[in-house]
Amino acid sequence: MPDFLGIAGLQAGFDLLAEAGMERLSVHVSALTRMLIEQLRSLRHRNGAPLVKIYGPANTIDRGGTVAFNVCDRDGVPMPYTLVETRARQAGVSLRGGCFCNPGASESAFGLEPVRIGACLADLGATFTPRTFRRVQRHRHRRRPRLVRTGQQPRRHPTRGRRGGFVRVLTRRK
């Protein structure tokens, strides 16, 4: 629901921006963004694999204050953003999940060509809806357990199971 009462605070917000100065704010946002990227890049799983995959420019000169990233499992597979959002919210961290808040950015980050995206959407036709997309996504994440090669331990995977719980899943390690 729109924040109609927040409209009353717009003028005070604009006054604060003018007082602080946009240049000063830009420098501060750039410093915070640089710190965030450095800290995210330092996060590792126990096996040394990166915990996150960061998209976009590597420096703060060519990027704004938004940092797009995926949280990945120890095999480098991105975890469902809904799970990441839920866990972040439970920890009191504010995130915006998904890829549709900045149209075109995710397509660019993944190197997707507009012509191919258009053709794909045209092939999906009128039956493609957010509901059918979610159903396909849920189906994609349901994999049958596979056997572990001799001598390897089964791993616990946070994206399996109901009600956000953990379920032991046997998978083949790469």
Image: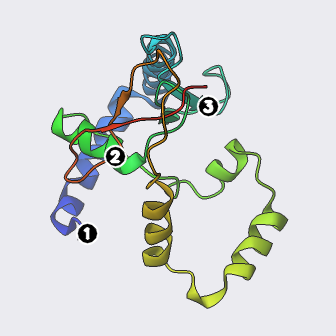
- Measure the C-alpha gap from mark 1 to mark 3: 28 Å
Q: What number of labels is visible? A: 3
Residue extending farthest to the bottom is 126
Q: Which of marks 1 and 3 is nearer the N terminus?
A: 1
The residue beneath circle 1 is 2
* Camera-side mark, 1 or 2: 2
Residue 33 picture location, percent across and down: 48, 23
Q: What residue type is labelled 1?
A: Pro
Q: Which amino acid does label 2 sit on?
A: Arg
Where 92 falls versus 112 (above or below)? Answer: above
Where 3 falls versus 63 (above or below)? Answer: below
The residue beneath circle 2 is 160
Residue 70 picture location, percent across and down: 50, 36
**Which numbered circle lies on residue 133?**
none
Residue 105 picture location, percent across and down: 64, 49
Which image quadrant is residue 142 in? Answer: bottom left
Alpha-carbon neighbours of circle 1 within 10 Å: few (<14), some, or many (≥20)? few
